[in-house]
Image (spheres, coloured by chain):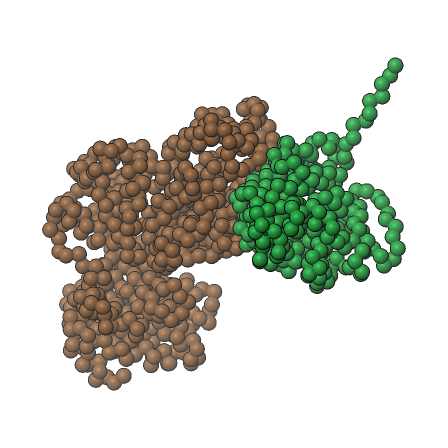
């Protein structure tokens, strides 16, 4: 009798999907953040991302714990509260060939980290920046964060009187070149968005509604599973075709927008909202305002500009990682010091 | 002005017959933003070129234009280049401060002043030289807008004549200052000539001050500490520079950018072998430096006190997660905004323990521009060898003022990047654990993202030696104890103190940083005036070397001289020293915002030693006395 061993499934760089897993999550059962980790694992596996080239970065909070739960063989950096963007910036300056995956939360981004968030967006640093947005501080037991909607209620009955910060509208305004919103419960959309983000050269900001099952999943919350499901308004149906796959997507003229990403991957955005154009900045901001006024979340790729120079390109640095340059390159010869000294005489 | 005015003023002032050669100080009082810096540096440089040891100290306001500024040049044949209290020649160009400037002078001093200010009636114990600057500048500069800038060069011409500085030296110095602007050179040369000629035709020399050629500056260079540190950083092979502008540190990164653009662009590709980012604040500046350090770059930032305060949290992260970074702290007067354009050594304690929790940082204390250069290089090696942030504690006096120095030596040692794991190392150490103390020196091995070596999760939260998240009491304690062990290793590696033991001395002096220059002179004063012999221990780094205790033990009393109110270095020493030695320490403190001078140090020590001294005559007290309490 012969047994046929099932062929081990591997991705295009020959890695098993297990290679993309991390350590066991310590977040609450049912936490939206865990679904996001799953989608990251899935997207990186399917894209054939080499984990050795990835750096996972985060700030502080529940969201920021999650990089430990995916891509276990990648380097990770759990920085200080709200300041992950600067650490990520430095890391990429040192080695421009790293693939940076940042995970933040709504407090980490919208409150303590709003300053660094703002400057990250305007620099267009090549990083995938995911906000796991549950509208509250989980790790300190459920206080409001700045993305909590007006009128939203805490478990304790406290009502939020202040307007929320819309991180997507803000990111677009600041110059981010890839801005998306998704819902941790929408596997298909979130997976496509993350894959597209990984193909983008520049800052890819993804705000993911990710209900906090412990502190913000009750009636009266606008970040609960039930609310998000009912008010999720996808702008497009997203098909992502990575550059290494030879698939032609057939679509009816005028119904679908094709966007070619930096690495040659293609994004097909089938319009669900009338004539939505993800390349149109003003329309993007208008739609964000209109949907918010209706109490809805516009999801999908809200804005994309694949051709803008990223920060590292603007700096005109050598191709080899700065961290790897040998002494002969980084220490000028004796003659240089002598010239400088002569000038000072 | 009428000729008769001059005559009247002359009779009201005194005349000296003796000559005072190459030993005096000149203070120029101007309004900032008036181009006086060029005139002052030309004056300084021309004296330097004449071979006379010289130093320049700029006391300027935190302002762009319109507020008073004073530039003090000290020429000293014996090579003393610390600040000096006595002003021998005042150039009074600023109507706002002229009265006080003149009243604060000691008897016998000389005043060159803008004639309309009519200062000579204020005192009868000074030598006055009125100069009609506005009339003179109108002759050399037709463009009324430029006059304001050229006007100051006239006093250089006047002083060249009075002090007998060769005009050719002045012109060489001018060319050096304005070399790339030929039109400006011609215009300013005209101003120099007019000033010189006016003095020759109208002023009869009645002061003693003379500059005479000597050979005290042969082969030396003139440079500011910030520029020296910038050269050091470039030679250290810095690749990532992240910074946020702040006085008095901005010129460090700005000079560095200039040098990097000149000497660190790859010829074939035109691309930079460095990255410079002006961050959104000091928090981000250090965050970027840390990110870059973690990712394997030689990274740095430069700041001053307020930036240090902001960097506190990240500094703790870098200490605990063990990430190299170099931070230059060009200290200014605090707390808070303090006096942003005045000097101090007030960040010592804050920086040594910067962050919450048990944290200790390496501090280097350059005392000279040359050490700004060498310690910049050492800082990068130490940061990587010890995998920790290293602070180079300069100050405004050192960083922004112009100093003489012997030219800098090319580094003799190769760059040392510390314990970075490659496949060979991995084989030797066996299983990689980011925070394992393999060698017993407290320093673990590290891997770098993108190197294809085992990865680890870097974090500021509790971790065990495998870099795993841990809240276990034994993991925590083991880890911070190792960090303490690492600090002991650092103690052996940091720059050694410079010690001068005088076998006849029963008292010792400890100082650090820019205070050094006042100490050199003060020790000579103490010896000459009171036959008080001293030994000298100059601290170059924290942690202190172990010989600190033996130095104190050798002496009955040890004076720790520093530029802050709270005796910060002395306090830091108390933590290290055995109780019986602490009682030997005394403090000499100077914290006016001005650079420390030898007289202050000497008088303080003399008083504490029970010697009688003439009442310390500080600028402050003299002005109070002459102007009257509360001024006008």
How far across and down, in percent of the image, does residue A74 sit?
Answer: 63, 36
How far across and down, in percent of the image, does residue A225 sit?
Answer: 69, 45
Which residue is depicted at the point 27% across and 59% down? B74
How far across and down, in percent of the image, does residue B123 sit?
Answer: 17, 73
Does residue B232 sit above or below B358 in this rendering?
below
Q: Which picture quadrant has residue A31?
A: top right
Q: Is residue B231 left or right of residue A246?
A: left
Q: Nearer the viewer, residue B335 or B123?
A: B335
Colour green belongs to chain: A
Tell me if residue A80 can be seen. yes
Q: Nearer the viewer, residue B327 or B435?
A: B435
Which residue is depicted at the point 28% across and 80% down? B116
How far across and down, in percent of the image, does residue B515 sit?
Answer: 29, 49
Query: For the C terminus of chain B, which image quadrant?
Result: bottom left
Which residue is depicted at the point 28% across and 65% down? B27
Quick one: which residue is furthest to the front in this view?
Answer: A157
Q: Nearer the viewer, residue B502 or B172?
A: B502
Does residue B147 sit above or below B472 in this rendering?
below
Q: Which picture quadrant has residue B25?
A: bottom left
**Which shade of the palette goes to chain B?**
brown
Q: Nearer the viewer, residue B137 or A94?
A: A94
Total labels: the figure holds 0
Query: For the N terminus of chain B, which image quadrant?
Result: bottom left
Q: Is residue B536 left or right of residue B357?
A: left
Quick one: which residue is furthest to the left in this view?
Answer: B612
């Amino acid at each position: 009798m012969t047994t046929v061993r099932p062929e081990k499934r591997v991705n295009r760089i020959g890695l098993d999907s297990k290679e993309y897993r991390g350590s066991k999550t310590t977040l609450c059962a049912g936490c939206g953040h865990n679904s996001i980790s799953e989608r990251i694992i899935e997207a990186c596996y399917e894209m054939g991302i080499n984990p050795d080239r990835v750096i996972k970065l985060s700030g502080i909070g529940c969201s920021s714990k999650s990089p430990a739960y995916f891509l276990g063989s990648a380097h990770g950096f759990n920085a200080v509260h709200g300041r992950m963007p600067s650490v990520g910036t430095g890391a990429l300056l040192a080695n421009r060939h790293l693939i940076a995956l940042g995970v933040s939360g709504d407090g980490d981004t919208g409150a303590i980290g709003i300053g660094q968030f703002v400057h990250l967006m305007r620099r267009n640093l090549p990083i995938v920046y995911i906000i796991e947005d549950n509208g509250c501080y989980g790790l300190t037991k459920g206080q409001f964060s700045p993305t909590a909607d007006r009128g939203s209620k805490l478990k304790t009955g406290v009502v939020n009187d202040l307007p929320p910060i819309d991180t997507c509208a803000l990111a677009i305004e600041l110059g981010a070149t890839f801005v998306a919103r998704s819902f941790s419960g929408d596997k298909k959309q979130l997976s496509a968005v993350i894959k597209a983000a990984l193909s983008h050269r520049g800052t890819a900001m993804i705000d993911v509604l990710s209900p906090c099952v412990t502190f913000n999943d009750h009636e009266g919350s606008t970040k609960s599973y039930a609310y998000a499901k009912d008010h999720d308004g996808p702008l497009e149906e997203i098909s992502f075709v990575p550059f290494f796959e030879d698939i032609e997507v057939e679509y009816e003229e005028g119904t679908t927008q094709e966007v070619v990403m930096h690495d040659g991957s293609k994004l097909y955005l089938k319009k669900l909202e009338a004539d939505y154009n993800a390349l149109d900045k003003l329309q993007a901001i208008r739609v964000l305002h209109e949907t918010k006024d209706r109490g809805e979340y516009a999801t999908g790729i809200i804005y994309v500009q694949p051709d803008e120079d990223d920060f590292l390109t603007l700096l005109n640095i050598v191709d080899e990682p700065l961290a790897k340059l040998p002494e002969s390159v980084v220490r000028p010869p004796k003659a240089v010091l002598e010239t400088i000294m002569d000038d000072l005489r | 002005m009428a000729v008769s005015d001059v005559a009247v003023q002359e009779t009201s002032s005194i005349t000296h017959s003796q000559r005072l050669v190459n030993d005096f100080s000149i203070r120029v009082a101007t309004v900032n933003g008036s181009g006086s810096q060029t005139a002052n540096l030309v004056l300084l440089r021309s004296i330097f070129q004449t071979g006379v040891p010289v130093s320049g100290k700029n006391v300027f306001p935190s302002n762009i234009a319109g507020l008073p500024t004073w530039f003090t040049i000290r020429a000293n044949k014996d090579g003393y280049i610390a600040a000096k209290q006595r002003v021998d020649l005042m150039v009074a160009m600023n109507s706002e401060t002229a009265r006080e400037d003149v009243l604060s002078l000691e008897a016998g001093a000389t005043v060159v002043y803008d004639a309309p200010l009519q200062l000579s009636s204020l005192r009868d114990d000074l030598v006055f030289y009125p100069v009609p600057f506005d009339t003179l500048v109108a002759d050399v500069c037709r463009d009324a807008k430029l006059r304001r800038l050229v006007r100051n060069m006239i006093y250089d011409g006047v002083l060249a004549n009075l002090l007998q500085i060769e005009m050719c030296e002045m012109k060489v110095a001018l060319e050096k200052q304005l070399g790339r602007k030929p039109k400006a050179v011609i215009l300013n040369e005209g101003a120099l000539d007019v000033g010189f000629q006016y003095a020759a035709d109208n002023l009869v020399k009645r002061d003693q001050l003379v500059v005479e050629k000597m050979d005290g500056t042969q082969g030396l260079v003139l440079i500011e500490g910030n520029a020296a540190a910038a050269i050091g950083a470039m030679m250290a092979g810095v690749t990532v520079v992240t910074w946020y502008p702040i006085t008095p540190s901005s010129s460090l990164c700005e000079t560095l950018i200039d040098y990097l653009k000149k000497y660190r662009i790859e010829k074939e590709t035109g691309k930079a072998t460095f990255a410079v980012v002006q961050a959104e604040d000091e928090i981000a500046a250090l965050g970027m430096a840390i990110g870059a350090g973690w990712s394997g770059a030689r990274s740095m930032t430069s700041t001053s006190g307020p930036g240090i305060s902001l960097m506190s949290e990240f500094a703790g992260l870098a200490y605990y997660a063990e990430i190299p970074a170099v931070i230059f702290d060009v200290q200014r007067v605090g707390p808070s905004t303090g006096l942003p354009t005045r000097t101090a050594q007030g960040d010592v304690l804050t920086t040594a323990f910067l962050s919450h929790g048990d944290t200790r940082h390496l501090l280097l204390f350059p005392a000279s521009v040359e050490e700004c250069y060498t310690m910049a290089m050492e800082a990068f090696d130490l940061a990587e060898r010890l995998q920790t942030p290293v602070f180079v504690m300069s100050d405004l006096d050192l960083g922004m003022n112009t100093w003489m120095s012997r030219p800098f030596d090319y580094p003799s040692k190769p760059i040392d990047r510390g314990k970075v794991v490659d496949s060979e190392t991995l084989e030797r150490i066996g299983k990689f654990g980011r925070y394992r103390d393999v060698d017993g020196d407290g320093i673990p091995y590290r891997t770098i993202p993108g190197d294809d070596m085992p990865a680890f999760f870097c974090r500021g939260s509790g971790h065990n030696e495998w870099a795993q998240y841990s809240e276990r009491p034994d993991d925590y304690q083991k880890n911070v104890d190792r960090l303490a062990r690492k600090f002991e290793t650092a103690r052996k590696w940091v720059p050694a103190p410079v010690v001068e033991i005088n076998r006849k001395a029963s008292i010792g002096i400890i100082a650090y940083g820019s205070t050094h220059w006042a100490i050199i002179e003060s020790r000579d004063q103490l010896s000459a005036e009171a036959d008080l012999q001293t030994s000298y221990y100059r601290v170059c780094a924290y942690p202190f070397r172990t010989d600190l205790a033996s130095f104190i033990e050798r002496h009955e009393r040890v004076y720790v001289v520093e530029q802050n109110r709270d005796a910060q270095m002395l306090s830091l020493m108390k933590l290290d020293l055995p109780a019986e030695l602490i009682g030997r320490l005394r403090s000499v403190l100077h914290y006016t915002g001005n650079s420390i001078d030898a007289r202050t140090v000497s008088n303080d020590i003399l008083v504490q030693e029970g010697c009688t001294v003439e009442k310390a005559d500080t600028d402050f007290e003299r002005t109070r006395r002459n102007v009257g309490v509360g001024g006008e």
